[in-house]
Image (spheres, grey):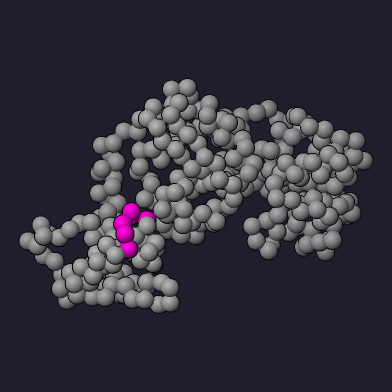
Amino acid sequence: MNIPSMSNLRRIDLNLFTVFEAIYQERNLTYAANRIGMSQPAASNALKRLRALFDDELFVRQGNTMQPTPRARELASSFNPALDLIRDGLAARAVFDPTQPRAFNIAGIEHLEHFVLASLLNAIGPNSGRIRLNAVGGFVDEFKDELKSGEIDLAIDHVSLADEEFEVSQIGQDTLISLVRQGHPYAGKTLNLDETLALDHVCLKARDHRGFVAERFLRANGRADAIMVRVTHFYAMLSVIENSNLVGTMPRLIAERFLAHYPVARLKTAIPERAFRVLLIWHRSQTHDPGNVWLREHLIRAYASATRHKSFTA
């Protein structure tokens, strides 16, 4: 097997290894080329040179994908950490200047986006007037490709990605609270299981067939028919709650805002109010990018500010 020696390193184009990494992660030559800003013919030529260099096919076509050979998997275990070290070294010298123009794209669940972005602007401060923030609504698993390519810088979600290419940092936690309109017969009360199941509910449309927490609870207790309305965001849920006798269950962060500004009231149902995590998620290639580091630090401050509130009473 042909293995480049130390004496031959001067003749090797190190850019080939970034092509190798991109193909290995994307499993598609076109996607890999787009990711690193290279034309497909150029990426194809680079792969040809890699094959000649290591005397191995490295990637073989299977349907619409390029699957790595055993030799490619062996090389990846060395190449990818080495490239990360190079990126770390370059990033260590770089300093992010927030006064220079830059746009950050942040994907997130609607209620987190609503509260965190306003606090993020305050955390950034007036001296960062050239920073632009673009919010993209949705769940993190919808944006894996965009996170990989750098099109999206960060995602905020309650669920992580089961993929070693992504980094995760917990920035807080939240719990669930149930609300009804003011004047509802059960406003301010604590309900047992039978009373909870006897009520009709408005639920958030979930990311999969299992449903949001409240929907799973109702289904598990034989009351799927109690779900009278499904909505795509919490402000729509608020409107339904205000104008009906339906119960809505939502994260405490947004429920407290609704309680402070809208004619709704809390009630304690038998639906579990267990805690769940609030996570920042990004692709590992962005871990040491000065701009991404700066953004993560400010998002952590922004979330802390958004959740710094007084407890309410039912």
Q: Position of residue 278 (x, y in %)?
A: 57, 44
Q: Residue at x 43, y 77 (%)?
A: 63
Position of the N terminus, as image quadrant, is bottom left
Q: Pick whichever, 210 or 153, lies toward us.
A: 153
Q: Position of residue 113 (x, y in %)?
A: 59, 40
Q: Which residues are magenta?
A: 35-40
Q: Position of residue 27 (x, y in %)?
A: 39, 67
Q: Residue at x 79, y 58 (%)?
A: 218
Q: Position of residue 263 (x, y in %)?
A: 82, 32
Q: Pick whichever, 75 or 45, lies toward us.
A: 45
Q: Does 128 sit left or right of 24 as displayed?
A: right
Q: Is residue 89 above or below residue 59?
A: above
Q: Quadrant of residue 111?
A: top right
Looking at the magenta stretch, what is its main secondary structure? loop
Q: Pick whichever, 86 or 136, lies toward us.
A: 136
Q: Does 264 sit left or right of 277 as displayed?
A: right
Q: Residue at x 37, y 56 (%)?
A: 35
